[in-house]
Amino acid sequence: MSFAIPNTLTISRILLTPFFAYYFLLNTQDERLTATIIFFIAAFTDWLDGFLARKMRYATRMGQFLDPVADKILVSTALAILAYSSYIYVWMVVIIIVRDVLLTALRIYAMQHGKVIITSSFAKWKTFFQMGFLFAVLIYLNFPELPNIKLLFTKEDYLMWPTISAAIVTLLTIASGAHYLIYNRSHLIEIFRRLTKRWFH
């Protein structure tokens, strides 16, 4: 039974995500604090499930698939909410989500065909910086006496720390995605061959 704990924590991260979104969008100071605490708990399960999986020497194909998917659901939801609330630019979030959807589709393809997906440390650092950025913004928003960081959609927005930080996170996400595809290029080649075979035969 204890071997199921890492996967349970991963699933709990997915289940906590809509609660985080709900409380943040209520847009009151108390609910925003609640949302921040929920996000912290959800993010902590990411570290804890990995720690327990290593300690128990327990790894499953489901866990290897669900863990990054749970991260993407939590991070993408948080970024989308910040964009909706005009704290970061929508185009940055779109780039990150499109990257994650494409790579998740590649993971699903690999699993269906019994292939191994190679995950680099670069991708883990990308997630670390994404989480760090989200923590920084969420914590900042719990101090209403601090300067407003909402976008005014002027050139000055690009001088604010959330915009600069979000741009760095976006670039890291693009770079890690490219790195990921290079590592797993054999799958892309196979997909291309399968598609061309269908189209021309």
Image: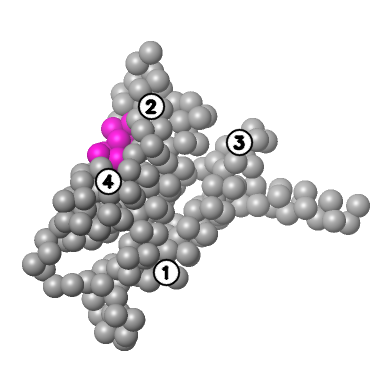
Q: Amino acid at mark 3?
A: Met
Residues in magenta, as a range: 41-50
Instruction: Please state which amino acid type lies under the numbered disc 4.
Output: Phe
Q: How far, Cα to Cα, is label 4 from label 1?
A: 21 Å
Element type where label 1 sits in the image: helix
Instruction: Measure the C-alpha gap from mark 2 to mark 4.
Output: 17 Å
Q: Do we see residue 136 in this rendering?
A: no
Question: Can you tell which mark lies on residue 90?
Answer: 1
- Of residues 42 and 21, the one nearer the viewer is 21
Q: Which residue is mark 3?
A: 111
Q: Which badge, 1 or 2, is on the more N-terminal residue?
A: 2
Please say if 93 is above or below 20: below
Q: Residue visible at 33% across and 49% down?
A: 22
Viewer-proximal residue among 27 and 73: 27
Q: Is residue 103 above or below residue 111?
A: below
Nearest to N terminus: mark 3 or mark 2:
2
For the residues marked 3 and 1, what is the alpha-carbon distance in whole angstroms? 31 Å
Residue tagged 2: 8
Relative to 40, 22 lies left or right: right
Residue at 49% x, 53% y is 100
Kind of residue at disc 2: Thr
Residue at which label 4 appears? 39
Q: In the image, residue 174 lies at what x, y percent?
A: 46, 63
Q: Nearer the viewer, mark 4 or mark 3?
A: 4
Q: Can you tell which quarter of the image residue 116 is in?
A: top right
Q: Marks 2 and 1: in contact by CB < 8 Å?
A: no
Could you tell whether 187 is left or right of 165 in the image? right
Please provide percent x and percent y for residue 11: 41, 32
